[in-house]
Image (spheres, grey):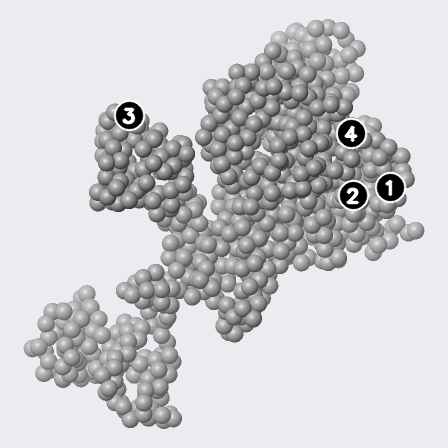
Amino acid sequence: MNYTDPKKYIYIKGARCNNLKNIDVAIPRNSFTVITGLSGSGKSSLAFDTLFAEGQRRYVESLSSYARQFLGRMSKPEVDFITGLSPAIAIEQKVNNKNPRSTVGTGTEIYEYIKLLYARIGRTLSPISGEEVKRHTVTDVVDRLLQIREGLKVTLFAPMPKHDSLNLKEHLQLLIQQGFTRISVKGEIGRIHDMLEKVGKNPKDIRILIDRFTIKHNDHDLESLLFDSVQTAFHEGYGKCEAEIENGETLLFSNLFELDGMTFEKPSENFFNFNTPHGACKTCEGYGSVIGISEDLVIANPSLSVYDDAVACWRGEKMSEWKNEWVMNAYKFDFPIHKPYRELTPVQKALLWEGNEICGGINTFFKWVEEQSFKIQYRVMLARFRGKMTCPDCQGTRLRKDAGYVKIAQKSIQELALMPISQLRIFFDQLAAPETQMLTETEHAIAKRLLTEICNRLGFLIDVGLEYLTLNRLSSSLSGGETQRINLATSIGSSLVGSLYILDEPSIGLHTRDTHNLIKVLKKLRDLGNTVIVVEHDEEIMRAADYIVDVGPLAGEQGGEIVYAGKAEELLQQNTLTAEYLNGKKSIPVPAQRRKWRNKITLHNVYENNLKYLTVSFPMQAMTVVTGVSGSGKTSLVKRVLYPAIKRHLGLISDEQIGKFESIDGDLQIIHDVELVDQNPIGRSSRSNPATYVKAYDDIRQLYAEQKLAKTRNYKPGFFSFNTEGGRCETCQGEGFVTIEMQFMADVKLVCEECNGKRFKEEVLEVQYKDHNIADILNLSINQAIEFFDKDSSTVTKRIINKLKPLQDVGLGYLRLGQSSSSLSGGEAQRIKLAYFLTKGNSDKNTLFIFDEPTTGLHFHDISNLKRAFDALIANGHSIIVIEHHEDIIKTADWIIDLGPEGGNEGGNIVFEGTPEDLIKNENSYTGRFLKKKLL
């Protein structure tokens, strides 16, 4: 087989990036290929640092001379050559978009098409009468006049406009000079000279007579005369004219966009764009939220009624006068003072906030407080209840209010932006179907292409399991997996062909129920004529692939080889670790017995986001898994409510706003600390690395400061730090690279020419410990460092080994000590945090650990190591709560909380609480259905 044929294969020759060992591999073009292997085996080095980097380099070579001048300094991927490479597109899992204006709608480009749709066929309806606002053209007026019965006489008038620089009589003299001879004053027609004495001061009483004519049908001369007369009337009447018919009827026309005394904006694309000053809400400037009196702070416990002090600011001896006023007068306007706030209707809530002529509302109260703000206690009260709130003008939709007057099929663009994507797809499918007659023939012809694009893109989002999102959802609030799947859906929507797509674990955050839909999307991308390469560990995706590249056999120095490359079904006959887990020779064992637990923490009536007043208990000193389909409420329950609620209980400082719930109780006394181990980077800068995070670098610096040459030169430990001035290279400020700003392109990072990427000054590198300088130590892998320092039995080296050992235990021995945090995957960052906590795990301080999808980036074999680390934490008296979809973690749990049954508005309920053995008996649980094959 000729693997070097560029039309059939992407052939990589001699790849040596990172730990890759001069490998050769061929990947079929126009196929769906999975690259798998242990974490750290070299998958990302092959997919991103070699394939994608070379694809990008070739792209830059095609650009201007300005861009190419940096190519001589840019390092090429360490590979002999690659043939058959297409233009490369990488879809990674990192949430890069922190723009507070970016939403799901703008990110997927669906909102751009909807804006165009509303600008082209939207109908503006008056909020007063509900009538459509229409703008009359000269042709519209002439056509209407020619419909009048033949033989009737018609008089055409233009209303007298108000003139700022002339008085009324001067304006009339000007009309005479322009050739006009007659006017109407309060219905009486006469010559302008004769009517001057009858003219008052009000121009509204005066109309200019433009023309008089008798209606004749099929008279081309009359039609031409009418066009001229109507045009003149519109000009003189500043866009308005009147036609009085002999039968007493009066027709009013206007080429202004107005109705019911209101002037409306003519719909345009920018009219619906909240990223421009023209379309953005004037109050919140397009952000959707403002700083004001927060409902969540004022109504801290919605289960209380007004009578039971639901309004927090009306408590206390003086402020309770406002509450007493409501209690005493509520019967007069039928307000239920004993009904819990959460059960009040929207009208009743609005009444409580706005008040009426009898009682002042909450807003009235705060206006009074502001008037008293010269006293410090009132300023303190204002600050206490002030927070981020939904914009009162646009209700969080970010658009100017009058954009809501434009509707298609009685729906405004704001209403569509707040709909879940599943409902939005139904609406647009009905709109696009001619038989529903929701659009006229003309509108359908105009909208056909736009509706096709919108329906297709909404369909792709549903296919990748994101039907619960709304177009208004902020991009920065999405998880890494959601971001990647949105990028995937957008890429399919762009209908590119002949490209190379490289995806980094698109199954992250996706429930097993939805994996088959994701596979369909990936195959559709392939069928369009693209090559799809996925770095993935999911069993179902691997089995569905056309081709598999298994990198290994182990991680780090023991990886970097191609242990298998071929058809997916033939992998099962191999002896690789991946094959052994797929064919059942190896497996993650189910615990012989579940841990028995006595203590628990209970949250009462949680109603954050889509959670529907849940009361849920979390066992302590056990492993609890919170699972459910995407969007069912897992993150809202655990990260938005439980975590900050416990932090507040422990008196720990937290900047996070706590999600909505009523109370927390249970055995809180046994928890002394709480830690959230998520996939965010381990440090705030690229200088952060594994050695600094687990505090091993402090001891390494101390070790080098104790060397003879360092003492002679009086080098303190800080001199060996790349974070502070002294021994670090000042050209790159200890980064090891410099950043070149590129016009209209991403910045380019180049190795620092001063220190050659070593981060330190030359004199610092002269200090050595066992023939290794400080830069050499940072370049060691964790496995190599442990072996290196184990040769010395000093106190300092023992401390270093003790701090590095947990990193090895969680399967990260392949990482380099000085590896930048920006190069770590979400799963690697999470396990570094886990290792750091393991170093403190033997303390008496019982801690609740919360893990957010810890299996991200983990091979089956790595999950075994992770499970052992979890068991070690629980054995030391700690408690673990895991948000997870991976069946191998779910099956090992002591307790499962399954949320759902669906995502978004149809989620937020507890489907099941109990052990895995009981979960598989529950027919209502999607998780239980897919878990059966792991337990039976």
Q: Quadrant of residue 164?
A: bottom left
Provide the residue designation for mark 4. 588
Q: Hey, which residue is sitting farthest right in the picture? A: 1
Q: Nearer the viewer, residue 50 or 206?
A: 206
The first of marks 2 and 4 along the sequence is 2
Residue beneath disc 3: 316
Q: Which of marks 3 and 4 is nearer the N terminus?
A: 3
Res. 798 mark: none
Element on which disc 1 rests: helix
Please say if 400 is above or below 718: below
Q: Mark 1 points at which residue?
A: 571
Q: Which mark sits nearer the N-terminus, 4 or 1?
A: 1
Q: Where is residue 442 in the image (x, y as percent from the top left)?
A: 51, 74
In the picture, which quadrant includes the C terminus? top right
Which of 527/271 is in front?
Answer: 527
Residue at image mark 2? 542
Measured as percent of width and height from the top left, residue 184 is found at: 16, 80
